[in-house]
Image: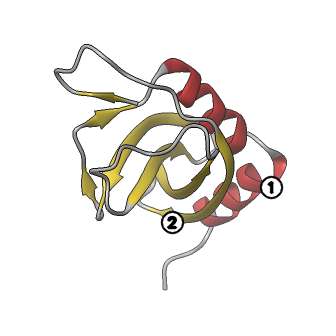
C-alpha cells in the first residue's frame, strides 16, 4: 500500500476476502471487501478498520477500487499487484455470480 505523498511503500499479500455485494443503481454494484492479509505483510499500523470497496459493472467487472478506513475513503492507495489480487478474487465465478444476482435484484 502506498500512503499519498510518501515515497516508501509496501505490498500486501491477501490470503482471503469476505465480501458483500450491493446494487447501487442501474449501472453499478458495490462490493465491500474485508481482507485477511498475510502475517509477513501487515496492514499499516494507523489503519483502524480497513476495507476495500470495489465498484463493479452489472456484469461483474471491477472498474474502481477504493481503500477505506472506518467506512470512509482513506489516504492509502493500492499497488498494481494488490489490485491484481483483488480483481482476480472479484472475477471468480462465486463473486461474479453474486454481483450479477445483486444487479438483477428488483427493488420493491
- Is residue 41 visible in this depiction of the protein? yes
Name the residue tied to disc 2. 22
Q: Quadrant of the N terminus?
A: top left
Q: Nearer the viewer, residue 106 or 14?
A: 14
Count how many numbered circles sit on residues in the image. Answer: 2
Gap in Å between the C-alphas at discs 2 and 1? 15 Å
- In this rendered view, identify the residue nearer to me: 90 or 27: 90
| Residue 40 image point, x, y percent | 61, 38
Q: Is 102 positioned to the left or the right of 107 in the image?
A: right
Residue shown at 21% from the left, 26% from the top: 4
Q: Earlier in the sequence, mark 2 or mark 1?
A: 2
93 left or right, relative to 47: right
Q: Nearer the viewer, residue 63 or 108?
A: 63
In the rendered view, would you say 4 is above or below 106? above
Q: Secondary structure at mark 1?
A: helix
- What's the residue at 49%, 86% (across, down)? 108
Query: Does dot 2 land on a helix, a strand or a loop?
Result: strand
According to the picture, the residue beneath numbered tag 1 turns out to be 94
Location of residue 62 by image quarter: top right
Tell me the number on the disc at residue 61. Answer: none
Residue at 33%, 49% (x, y): give it.
45
Left or right, 3 with respect to 42, comes to left
Amino acid at each position: 500500500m502506498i500512503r499519498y505523498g510518501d515515497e516508501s511503500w509496501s505490498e500486501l499479500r491477501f490470503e482471503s476476502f469476505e465480501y458483500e455485494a450491493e446494487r447501487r443503481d442501474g449501472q453499478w454494484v458495490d462490493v465491500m471487501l474485508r481482507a485477511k492479509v498475510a502475517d509477513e505483510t501487515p496492514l499499516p499500523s494507523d489503519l483502524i478498520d480497513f476495507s476495500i470497496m470495489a465498484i463493479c459493472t452489472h456484469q461483474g467487472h471491477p472498474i474502481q477500487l477504493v481503500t477505506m478506513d472506518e467506512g470512509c475513503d482513506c489516504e492509502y492507495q493500492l499497488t498494481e499487484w494488490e489490485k491484481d489480487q483483488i480483481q482476480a478474487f472479484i472475477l471468480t465465478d462465486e463473486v461474479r455470480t453474486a454481483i450479477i444476482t445483486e444487479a438483477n435484484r428488483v427493488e420493491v
